[in-house]
Amino acid sequence: MLETALSLSGYLFVLGLAGWHLGLPLESSNSAYLTATAMTLAGIVACQFGNAFACRSEYDSIWRLGFTTNRMLIGGIVIEVCLLLILIYVLPLRSMFGLAPLLLLFEECRKALRRSGGVKSLHPTRAMQF
């Protein structure tokens, strides 16, 4: 239930950043929709990490067990992240699964923070350096 709520929140957050709201039509070819779908998939994967760590013991806390004590679990998470990145960033797979890169999301979050006054503007010459 929590995984669903978090993933759906990520989906609606991305669409909200793009200016969409309930009642507006949303086509499956829209870049905001594709980015929101990728965000939902990433949210599901992230929740699975938490679930995997939480299910390691019926009684002991993850803080007591440690995050790196189960190498098979860490390996599985690394593979899962690699597969997620491949799905999102390899063009044929991205198109097949109806996803879009999440870089736009990070850039839009930065802009929203800057508009709200949460992030100070960089010096213009520094902002252009790579």
Image (cartoon, helix red, strand yellow):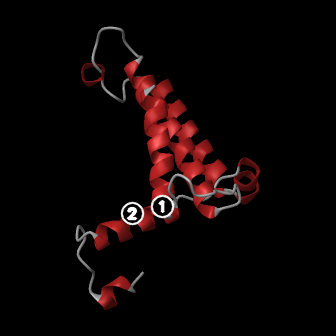
106 and 59: which one is in front? 106
Identify the residue under disc 1: 105
Q: Amino acid at mark 2?
A: Cys
55 relative to 29 in the view: left or right? left
Percent of width and height locating residue 21: 50, 56
Percent of width and height locating residue 28: 70, 55
Which quadrant of the rendered structure holds the C terminus? bottom left
Residue at 23% x, 75% y is 120
Give the structural element (helix, strand or loop) at label 1: helix
When asked about the image quadrant of residue 53, the answer is top left
Pointers 1 and 2 in contact (C-beta within 8 Å)? yes
Task: In the rendered view, tell whether residue 84 sits above or below residue 26.
Answer: above
Task: In the rendered view, tell whether residue 1 sits above or below residue 126.
Answer: above
Residue at 48% x, 39% y is 7
When asked about the image quadrant of residue 6, the answer is top left
Residue at 39% x, 85% y is 129
113 and 59: which one is in front? 113
Q: Which mark is residue 109?
A: 2
Q: Real-space Cα distance between discs 1 and 2? A: 6 Å
23 and 45: which one is in front? 23
